Amino acid sequence: MPTELVRPVPGAHTHWNYVPSPPRWSIVLRRWAARQTRLDAPAWKLLTPPSTTGQWLLYFMYLPQGQLSPQHRFTLERLAAESARLMIVCACPPDHPVLAELKNHCDALCWKAVKGFDFSAYAIGMTELATHAPDSDVLVFNDSMLGPFAPLTPFIENARWRLSGLSASSLEENHLQSFALIVRQLNAEFLQAVAPVISTEWCYDASGPVILLQETRLARVASHHMSVGAFWYTDGSRHQDLCLNCPEQMLDAGFPLLKRSLYGKFASVFQDPSVMQALLRRLGHPELLGAKA
């Protein structure tokens, strides 16, 4: 693996092989309650099917009003420069004109209803890729992240695990952070292995259940069937979340994304807002004022 792709960050481990850790009893109880909120899966429609097995980027865009923000346009421009093909799963009103615009930016496009968080979109996009472009290597990410500020495709090429996270955390339990995941050989066998967590049969429509029952369980469920790991990992001794606690250091270390919540619900909580706005200017990204996470 090229040494320049992943560089060390104080308080973090690099090239981490997943090791399960027991969740606290309070998490177990909260998970039981969260299961009662399961809903039917959102409707979806494949508008432009993926056609070729290879390297793919799967980008989930949440556009409840059907409007592309400067953030989204910046991301689409950066993704156009990637060597991997691009599939977009867009949550927006049905038959919205924004879908016609998005067709010009991607190789495959899928509409989904607004209901359901990112895991419902991941399930849909992965299912369509496994059906139409089986055994592709795929990086999946969502628009809670800004960027990319470095190419994403090299992370696909250098992922040493069947299921990888760009970053991982020990918060709640050891887990891959779900804003960006990489799957090697995405196919029906992979989807069956992770079906307890990623499914087109059901969804959750609140962040709590998604975190408790999907994000923090995915690595443990998958590890029974495949190798799992992350490019960066924090054990909580110095940082709980690398993307929130040390975003500039992570970017300097090669991490390609920046959390939008630093400019929304966590503005002033983890970082100085003026420093974060200056960082966007240096990165050539449109500034965000009061952005929602």
Image (cartoon, rainbow, N blue to C red):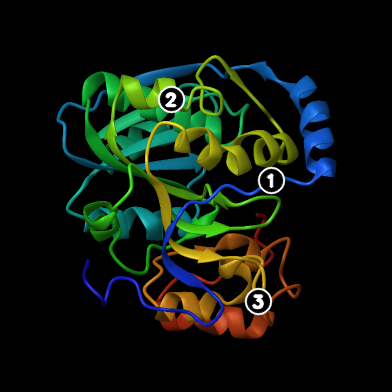
In the visual, does 272 lie left or right of 258?
right
Which amino acid, mark 3? Arg
Q: Which residue shows up at 48% across the image and 51% down it?
A: 18
Q: Are marks 3 and 2 in contact (CB under 8 Å)?
A: no
**Rendered location of residue 118, percent (x, y):** 55, 37
| Gap in angstroms between the C-alphas marked 3 and 2 | 33 Å
Instruction: Kindly identify which residue carries mark 3.
Output: 238
Q: Are marks 1 and 3 in contact (CB under 8 Å)?
A: no
Instruction: Kindly identify which residue carries mark 1.
Output: 22
Visible residue check, residue 243: yes
Of residues 101 and 199, the one drawn nearer to the viewer in this rendering: 199
Quarter of the picture containing the N terminus is: bottom left
Mark 2: secondary structure? helix
Q: Total marks drawn?
A: 3
Which amino acid, mark 2? Ala
Mark 3: secondary structure? loop
Asked if residue 113 is positioned above or below residue 177 in the image, the reply reads above
**Rendered location of residue 189, percent (x, y):** 33, 21
Q: Earlier in the sequence, mark 1 or mark 3?
A: 1
Instruction: Kindly identify which residue carries mark 2.
Output: 193
